[in-house]
Image (cartoon, rainbow, N blue to C red):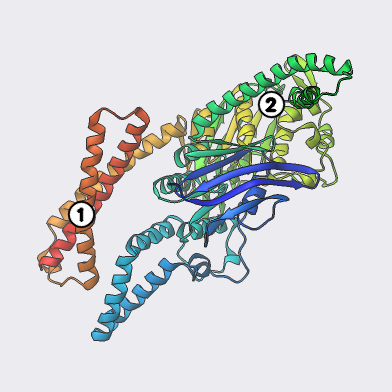
């Protein structure tokens, strides 16, 4: 039977006079990994704050399991001034941290002075580690800290950059021994390699999770249930993102059919009501009540959020943009070195690389926002840039959305026709009520969406998009992709959204660091496949070298005796290897049974490959320790 961690009944919340959601219900059970999907401004973050007790609903009730511990990652993490990295990471109320700290202190004391008292203390600490299975937890902490490059534990959080603070907050959440993880856009501001690691980590871990994300590959790989907020109501889909899309389309088709049916019946009932029936019998009163129910459905409007158009693009000449011997560095940090490229008409290029390798700096060089150290950037006379930046736009808070758009254009040319600024905004999900809202009242995602609209309105023929998917809802992302697929000009995209890159680009600039930029022909999945092959070859070579080293290791290195810790590790490895061998045989049996569907076979194959890597590593370590044990 499923264990309920948290449930919400009939929740309602408004922001000023704007209703976010009404009579919303949801259930979070132990072991479920759930994604929350809604358009910008629909109250996703407000709902998360309410569930975590950091805000209150206008109406409704929340029930939580007794002593439920929630770890909440906000979009913009906040830390108290003066805290160190160590104080943020290792909470005093985490039982595993207490046990590991006790074990480390006992081991340190035993190594410094070996006597009965320190030996007894170490024995007690080891038993505690065994009983609570804290060995695995210690390995988990090590893996997380290494991946997030958190090594200076005494550094104050006040001195960290925005990206470092996000990594610290995320690492703290993953290390915490919480019953429920709630993550608000966890992939924002992470590079692709980090996102892929986080995706694999969350999908493999046995945990309970509620997250908001726009990353469709991430959502598909991690979550097994989706809750959608649409028109202030909630809908539950028990499947991945592909299942959600199919069922949502079915739901909307059913709603449209219901409205059409109600409209036909409404005309008949309206005629009956106009005749003013004199007999107020119980039957006629029921029919009158039914009429108002039918009227409510018949007058319901399903917004048709379509974007079947292409904004008129400025004419583009033969020369687009040429880069000659471009160099840029900040002190000892070399970002771009001797880069050359000639852009051709209609090129679609994605930019990927670790944070801090110069991706945004490259865009600012092209748009003349920063100066190069040397080299030339020559734009064609007809080249007209549209630059969508990470920092967004600064506008007057007391201006309304429609007024802001009309400052650029009252009418927008679309192919051979013209539409109003209001219609253009509506296509991008700005309801007519929202168009008359002040800029200051927009959510973060709505401000990003407005920035996007303003960028497209300027009729660019060379679009530069720096992390355009951050904070945008899935509806807007889909519409943006449709627009960009029809865009005839040059397209340059920096993004950590792998799905977005796969759909839109045909080759990549890979920023490898230290000024190196590699031109790769293909989309992101092509690049990732090649990278995995190269990594596999490296691991095979490393494995062969380790085996040779283990076999040919000089006898004098084996002379020393195994320490207590090594003996304990050796015993643990024998247990783990035996367990992995059993799982290996089970996986092979499954894959050879012929009963798995393609999706299950792929998942089983992926697990088998990961298991073999783990097993090989543990066998090598066992071999090394066995030689020490025999000495």
Is residue 300 or residue 71 the one in the foreground?
A: 300
How far across and how far down the image is residue 277, in percent?
Answer: 87, 18
Classify residue 147 as left or right of residue 373. left
| Mark found first going from the N terminus, 2 or 1 | 2
Give the residue drawn at x 25%, y 39%. Answer: 587
Q: Kindly check if marks 2 and 1 are in contact, taking CB atoms under 8 A apart as contact.
A: no
Q: Nearer the viewer, residue 57 or 593?
A: 57
Above/below status of 12 relative to 124: above
Q: CA distance from mark 2 to mark 1?
A: 58 Å
Residue 2 versus residue 128 in the image, above or below: above
Task: From the top left corner, tell me how far across and down residue 434 is, in percent.
Answer: 78, 37
Neighbor class of circle 2 (other Cα within 10 Å; few <14, some 14-19, many 20+) is some
User: Image check: 471 left or right of 111?
Assistant: right
Locate residue 420 relative to residue 204 in the image: left or right. Answer: right
Residue 459 in view of the camera:
no
Q: In terms of depth relative to the viewer, which is nearer, 27 or 337?
A: 27
Which residue is drawn at the image coordinates 85% and 24% (left, top)? Answer: 280
Q: Nearer the viewer, mark 2 or mark 1?
A: 2
Q: Which residue is mark 1?
A: 620
**Residue at 30% over, 76% down:** 124
Q: Quadrant of the C terminus?
A: bottom left
Q: Is 19 in front, or is 402?
A: 19
Instruction: Identify the residue shown where x is 50% and y is 40%.
Output: 352
What is the crowding at mark 1: few (fewer than 14 residues within 10 Å), some, or many (at least 20)? some
Where is residue 138 shown, x and y percent of the image? 36, 63
Please provide percent x and percent y for residue 140: 38, 58
Which residue is labeled 2 in the image? 305
Query: Is 358 placed above or below 140 here?
Result: above
């Amino acid at each position: 039977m499923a264990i309920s961690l948290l449930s919400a009944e009939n929740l309602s919340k408004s922001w000023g006079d704007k209703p976010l959601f009404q009579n919303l219900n949801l259930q979070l059970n132990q072991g479920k990994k759930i994604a929350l999907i809604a358009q910008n401004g629909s109250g996703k973050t407000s709902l998360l704050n309410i569930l975590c007790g950091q805000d209150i609903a206008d109406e409704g009730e929340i029930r939580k399991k007794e002593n439920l511990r929630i770890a909440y990652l906000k979009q913009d993490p906040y830390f108290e001034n003066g805290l160190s990295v160590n104080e943020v990471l290792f909470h005093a109320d985490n039982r595993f941290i207490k046990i590991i700290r006790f074990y480390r202190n006992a081991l340190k004391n035993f190594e410094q002075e070996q006597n009965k008292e320190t030996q007894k203390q170490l024995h007690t600490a080891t038993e505690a580690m065994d009983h609570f299975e804290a060995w695995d937890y210690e390995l988990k902490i090590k893996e997380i800290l290494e991946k997030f490059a958190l090594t200076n534990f005494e550094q104050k959080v006040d001195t960290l950059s925005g990206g470092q603070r996000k990594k610290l907050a995320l690492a703290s959440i993953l290390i915490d021994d919480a019953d429920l993880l709630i993550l608000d856009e966890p992939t924002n501001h992470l590079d692709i390699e980090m996102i892929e690691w986080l995706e694999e980590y969350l999908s493999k871990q046995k945990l309970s999770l509620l997250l908001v994300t726009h990353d469709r590959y991430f959502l598909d790989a991690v979550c097994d249930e989706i809750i959608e907020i649409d028109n202030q109501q909630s809908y539950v889909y028990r499947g991945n993102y592909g299942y959600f899309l199919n069922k949502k389309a079915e739901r909307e088709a059913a709603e449209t059919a219901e409205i059409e049916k109600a409209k036909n019946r409404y005309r008949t009932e309206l005629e009956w009501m106009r005749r003013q029936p004199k007999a107020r019998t119980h039957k006629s009163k029921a029919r009158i009540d039914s009429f108002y129910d039918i009227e409510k459905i018949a007058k319901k409007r399903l917004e048709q959020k379509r974007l079947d158009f292409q904004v008129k693009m400025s004419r583009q000449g033969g020369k687009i943009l040429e880069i000659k011997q471009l160099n840029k560095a900040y002190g000892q940090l070399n970002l771009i070195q001797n880069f050359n490229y000639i852009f051709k008409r209609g090129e679609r290029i994605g930019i990927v690389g670790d944070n801090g390798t110069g991706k945004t700096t490259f865009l600012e060089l092209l748009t003349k926002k920063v100066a190069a150290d040397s080299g030339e950037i020559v734009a064609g006379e007809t080249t007209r840039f549209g630059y969508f930046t990470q920092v967004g736009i600064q506008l007057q808070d007391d201006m309304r959305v429609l007024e802001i758009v009309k400052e650029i254009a009252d009418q927008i040319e679309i192919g051979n026709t013209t539409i109003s600024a209001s219609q253009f905004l509506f296509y991008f999900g700005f309801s007519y009520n929202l168009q008359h809202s002040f800029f200051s009242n927009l959510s973060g995602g709505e401000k990003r969406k407005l920035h996007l609209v303003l960028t497209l309105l300027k009729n660019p023929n060379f679009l530069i998009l720096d992390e355009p998917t951050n904070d945008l809802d899935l509806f807007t992302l889909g519409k943006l992709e449709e627009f960009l697929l029809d865009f005839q000009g040059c397209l340059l995209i920096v993004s950590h959204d792998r799905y977005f890159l796969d759909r839109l680009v045909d080759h990549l600039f890979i920023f490898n660091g230290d000024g190196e930029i590699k031109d790769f022909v293909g989309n992101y999945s092509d690049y990732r496949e090649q990278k995995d092959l190269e990594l596999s070859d490296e691991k095979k070579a490393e494995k062969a070298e380790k085996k040779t080293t283990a076999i040919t290791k000089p006898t004098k290195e084996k002379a020393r005796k195994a320490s207590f810790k090594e003996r304990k590790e050796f015993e643990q490895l024998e247990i783990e290897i035996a367990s992995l061998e059993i799982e290996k045989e089970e996986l092979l049996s499954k894959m050879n049974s012929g009963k798995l569907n393609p999706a299950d076979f792929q998942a089983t194959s992926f697990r088998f490959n990961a298991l073999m890597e783990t097993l090989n590593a543990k066998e090598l370590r066992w071999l090394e320790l066995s030689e020490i044990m025999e000495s």
